[in-house]
Amino acid sequence: MNHILCIAWRNLWRNPRRTLITVVAIGLNVAVLIASYGLMEGILEHFLSSATNIVVGEVQIHSPKFLVDRSVYRDLEAPDDILSRLKRWNLPAVARSYGFGLVAHGTKSAGALFWGVDPVAERSVFDLAGNVLEGSFLSPVPQGGIVLGKKLARTLNVSVGDEIIVVVQAADGSLGNELYHVRGILKNVGDRIDREAAILHREDFKTLFVSGGRIHEIAVNTRGKVPLERLKEMAARAAPGAEIKTWRDLLPSLSDMMNFFDASMWLMGMIFFIAAALGVMNTMLMSTFERIREFGILKALGATPWRILLDVAAEAWVLGLISTLAGILIGLPLTYYLQVAGLDLSMFASGDVSVAGVALDPIWRAALAPKTVAVPVVVMWVVCLLASLYPAAIAARLDPVKAMVRT
């Protein structure tokens, strides 16, 4: 096999200018593919992280029909047992309570969705506590503080330290009202949270809504350590009779968009691979027609059609190998730069940017992963081999007598 590769290498450099042009073209092709795949991988990771790690989680457990009206009375049965089972299976989870109400500051007022959370658990399982624009997240002990979504805070014209009035319909039918100090204002983390989230310590929530410790949601987040379908199955076993939703069920627009990006990556790759295949085929055809007489002599000396086909295919593969190495040398530093510095898209959109309800970082960063390099390289090798089959078949089927007299 080594001598076939040596012959292929030598034949490639019979016409160095043509070989170099092909190597540069395919190498740039591979470099662009590596960088493009890195950017696509980066935005998919960003979407997934924003969708699951901040608030939503990979799987949520609710009482049936809770998501239809978010009624304070549709709480989970035996939530402590569910949390104990999840903990026993090493599945990080948090419990949350929800209720609607009114918040007011000065002459401004707005409707809000109140969350009752355990700040310690939220910090350990989700990244919401790290997405505070002003002030800080809730303290581990209830201190009468509240954290507001960014747009809700803007609507109320409040800042950190301001006092707001809260009025809600409590679970026992009474009217609950209380004063809270704004402890923090969230960054842009999603349309709905920005507009209506008012987050309280779960003990403050329990007092305000007279909820008796009702739990409406258990969100599970393993940060990708457990496959989604497996996680859904385990959540269903932990909470029999409850409604189990994955993040793809909860955020269908985002799920569709990620599938679209995934398909776009392959479509773009196909265009680049077809272009590379045409380049390789053109090079190998020219090389084959220049060496018709040589192939005729080889066949007259006893070379089989398979041996000639193997020679041409080996030549194409070596050409692909050199080209992909050049592409890696260009593509890796380029992708690393895009991973560190990213592309600043803020010039195309002013203010906060959300896609499918999920906040989007205006700095688009690539993600350098083994598959972003391996896929373009391996597929390009296969493309080079396939593109060589036609010229190889022409050479293999030559009549040695006619080929040797051809000028």
Image (cartoon, rainbow, N blue to C red):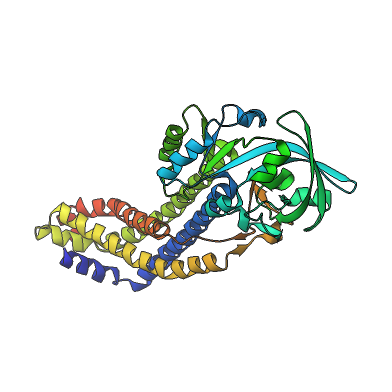
Q: Residue furthest right?
A: 107
The quadrant in which residue 135 appears is bottom right
The quadrant in which residue 238 appears is top left
Image quarter where the N terminus lies is: bottom left
Residue drawn at the location 65% of the way across and 58% of the way down:
362
- In the displayed structure, 311 sits above or below 259; it is below
- Counting from the top left corner in percent of width and height, residue 55 is at 59, 47
The quadrant in which residue 375 appears is bottom left
Along the line of sight, which residue is nearer the eye, 188 or 344? 188
- In the displayed structure, 335 sits above or below 384; it is below
Residue 193 seen in the figure: no
Q: Residue furthest left?
A: 302
- Counting from the top left corner in percent of width and height, residue 202 is at 64, 44
How many marks on residues?
0
- In the displayed structure, 308 sits above or below 358; it is below
Specify whether 365 is left or right of 171: left
Residue 284 seen in the figure: yes
Along the line of sight, which residue is nearer the eye, 381 or 215? 215
Specify whether 183 is left or right of 65: right
Residue drawn at the location 45% of the way across and 54% of the way down:
272
Residue drawn at the location 29% of the way across and 60% of the way down:
316
- Counting from the top left corner in percent of width and height, residue 156 is at 83, 49
Along the line of sight, which residue is nearer the eye, 217 or 189? 217
Image quarter where the C terminus lies is: bottom left
- Counting from the top left corner in percent of width and height, residue 15 is at 32, 71
Residue drawn at the location 28% of the way across and 60% of the way down:
288
